[in-house]
Amino acid sequence: MSQIIIAFPRLEDAKKIKNVLNRNGYDDILACNSASQAIAAANESDGGIVLCGYRLADMQYSELYGYLPRDCQMLLIASPARLSECSITGIMCLPQPVRAHELSATLHTMMEAARARRGKERRGRRRSEREQKIIDDAKALLMERNHLSESEAHKYIQKLSMDGGNNLVETAEMILAFDQE
């Protein structure tokens, strides 16, 4: 799951939202009270969602959005009047007051969209020779050790990959690493 960064001017508000999200099954959450903290956290993460208010101590949501890495999304929570001023495409918005189930459902939708986008990006690129060799070595190991055909070994790696939420190369590396222990 991607990281969720909550940025509100009052740290207490960010922590309250964090507690609500924790109760709804979200666990990789950082609460902060400035845009600079949110930007630093977003730059260290591998994608994620910045959930913020309209104005933070050091900048407005629109400035913050401009500094976020490309793989980060923003969810703006503000009054309906402030949301009507938001004209930036790509920012999801929820009006205050926010209900826990609406917040959770919106975050879930955003995470699923990001997961689908990353999957599409991965499918669009070709494997390097090194990556293909790792997969081939793992298949050869499974074929030798478990008496599988190449097709069966490949399907086995695919299944482990899907079950574990990893790509084929990561799964093949795990198979090879496990064999060396």
Image (spheres, rainbow, N blue to C red):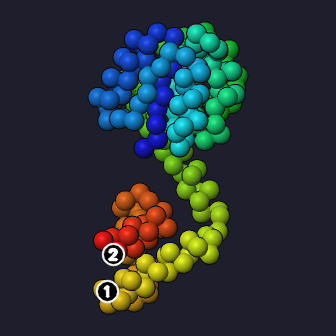
Query: How far from the left and from the top, in percent, is residue 151?
Result: 44, 85
Quarter location, residue 142: bottom left
Labels 1 & 2 near each other (Cβ < 8 A): yes
Give the residue at x 55% y 25%.
Answer: 38
Please name the amino acid that badge 2 sits on.
Asp
Name the residue beneath numbered marker 1: 145
- The CA span between labels 1 and 2 is 10 Å
The local crowd at label 1, few if under 14, some if 14 to 19, many if 20 or more residues have their Cα within 10 Å, is few
Which of the image's four quarters has the N terminus? top left
Give the residue at x 43% y 78%.
Answer: 138
Give the residue at x 58% y 35%.
Answer: 43
Q: Secondary structure at mark 1?
A: helix
178 and 38: which is toward the camera: 178
Give left or right: position of 87 versus 54.
right
The answer, for residue 152, to whether it is visible in the render is no
Please name the amino acid that badge 1 sits on.
Arg
Query: How far from the left and from the top, in percent, is residue 83?
Result: 61, 16
Which of the image's four quarters has the C terminus? bottom left
Name the residue beneath numbered marker 2: 179
The local crowd at label 2, few if under 14, some if 14 to 19, many if 20 or more residues have their Cα within 10 Å, is few
Q: Secondary structure at mark 2?
A: helix
122 vs 117: above or below: below
